[in-house]
Image: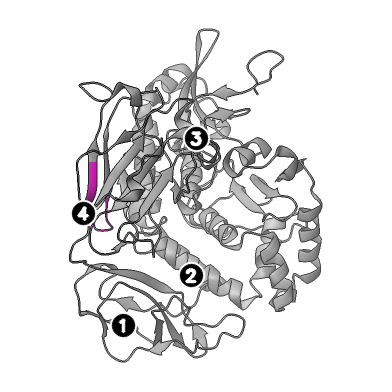
Amino acid sequence: FFRGAYSTPKLHYPLFPDSPVQDFETFILRGGVNRSFAGNKDSKPKHTTYTRDQWVRDSQIAMSGVGSHGIFVHLYLNGLYWGLYNLVERPDADFAVSYFGGDKTEWHAHNHDGAISGDSERIFTLGYTMLELEHGGFAIPENYDYVQSELDIVAFIDYIILNWYAGNQDWPAGNWYALQRNPTGKLHFFVWDAEHTWTKGASLYLELFEPSNLIGRLFMALMYNPDFKITFADRIYHLLYHDGVLSEANTLSRWNRLQATLDTAIVAESARWGDSRYDEPITREHWLKAQKRVTEQMIDNGDKLIHLLREAGHYPLIDPPQFNQHGGRITSNFALTMTTNKGDIYYTTDGSDPCLVITGNIQPQAMQYIQPLILTQTTHVKARTFADGVWSALHESTFLLESPFTKIAIIEMMYNPKGGDKYEFIKLKNIGNAPIDMSYAHFEGIDYVFSAGSVLDYGQCWVLVKNAKFFNERYEADFFAIYQGKLSNKGEKITLKDISGNVLSSVRYDDDNGWALSSDGKGDSLVVIQEHGNLGLCHKPLH
């Protein structure tokens, strides 16, 4: 805790590289407790990885863009080395204001033990309503509309899927946080204390029979609603397949990245606490074996979860249609084929869902797949299998038609602004002769991925900012999006790539070697001077 009575009221420091927040009133040092070298003697070294909890938090951020950030640190107490700790954000009212804005008095924070701060009336009303309607009441559209106004449905579904995917055994009767902004904001759940995951891979835990279990009872009550049930299936397929956040490749990538972070740091932890619990000291070799056990659980874990969900009746028995190419770059007259092992395929290209909400009937705009679909322009395809009155999960992809001449210029950067990194921005312009489909394009140097359907028109500029609040305070301009990470104050290479990894634009800058000194903390931005085409009016610098 930072308190003005005995110290600075807030810590101002970029603790978390992938977070835009640099001011903190609270954070927590987590030592792993039961699953650490210094923990409960009944705990077993085979579970001691230190990274389970952080993997779950990283995964929630990857899924929704929002979650508790964390890093690993060595802790010293008055000069005495005390071991390896996980420094994390606590999802409380201060956290909410930092990421979503508003005042602390507007935010209600809640966890498994009850209300933490703010007005709790709405979450208790939701809980009472859920108890009254849990046996089929949410199948009524009006009741489901009420829940949608109070709960972030997609984020809630993702939260459930993540805990099941990792096999969280100590949840949901305990170990969760939730935030809700009054008077109209939606309830959002956050993972917490997830060290009891990855014991045997995917498992369905809800502890449904405990009356105080808001999460479990809410989920089971909502599964009576057909729209919620199909949305749940859609999110499962979206997250587990086709480079989804919980695909095997991405699951392992996040895990291996955390393991690499601790690969040498764990030696110091072993030296400090490795001989505190057992006659035989616990070493890095024990830690490597524990890491390997989790890695083995991650192989084919998505298929295991699908099997469990189908057994529980939470996921359709029929598979979504498969495409001969899952989106990406195409040439004109590309022939898209769709296959299924049962039933008929219905698809749309106008953004609508082949399945109508509420009724579950076939969307009037949906077309039955009979023959290859010839694509002559950038197209977003949504498709489902329909068999025996049941819809599959949704398979959707964006197909990007190669344009005759597409070119983007990074025309302005505020990399080291006066007043701190919160005033950073980067400005792009389409200087080609046709609109550019930016779907799933991404940066290297900062963290931002363009969403599906993002099209930068000819001559149009987009501004991406570090912090919306501070950008609006200083600059008289609209911005397109908020990025994570930060521009280096010392110079670096910033690269924009398309969905296929092709470079769209790249620029290297420096704070020395002849580069303008006025842009290095003095208040000016870096502005391109080389003509890359028609830079036009939107080339006027913001600062």
Task: Give the spatial CA distance, label 3 vs label 2.
Answer: 29 Å
Residue type, mark 4 in image: Asn
Secondary element type, mark 1: strand
Task: Give the spatial CA distance, label 2 vs label 4.
Answer: 29 Å
- How many residues crowd around disc 2 within 10 Å: few (fewer than 14), some, or many (20 or more)? some
For disc 2, the marked residue is 234
Secondary element type, mark 2: helix
- Is residue 75 found inside the magenta-colored segment of the image? no
Classify 320 as above or below 301.
below
Name the residue: 38% across, 43% down.
Answer: 447
Which label lies toward us, 4 or 1?
A: 4
Asked whether 196 or 533 is in front, the reply is 533
Residue type, mark 1 in image: Thr
Q: How is the image coloured?
A: one colour
For disc 4, the marked residue is 502
For disc 3, the marked residue is 70
Tag 3–tag 2 contact (CB < 8 Å): no
Question: Would residue 318 appear left or right of 459 to someone viewing this image?
Answer: right
Tag 2–tag 1 contact (CB < 8 Å): no
Q: In terms of image quadrants, where is residue 98?
A: top right
Q: In terms of image quadrants, where is residue 434?
A: bottom left
Locate residue 236, reporting x and y percent.
47, 65
User: Which mark, by number, is residue 339?
Assistant: 1
Name the residue: 30% across, 76% down.
Answer: 323
Looking at the image, tell me whether mark 2 or mark 4 is earlier in sequence order.
2
Task: Give the spatial CA distance, label 4 vs label 3.
Answer: 32 Å
Name the residue: 34% across, 64% down.
Answer: 242
Residue type, mark 2 in image: Asp
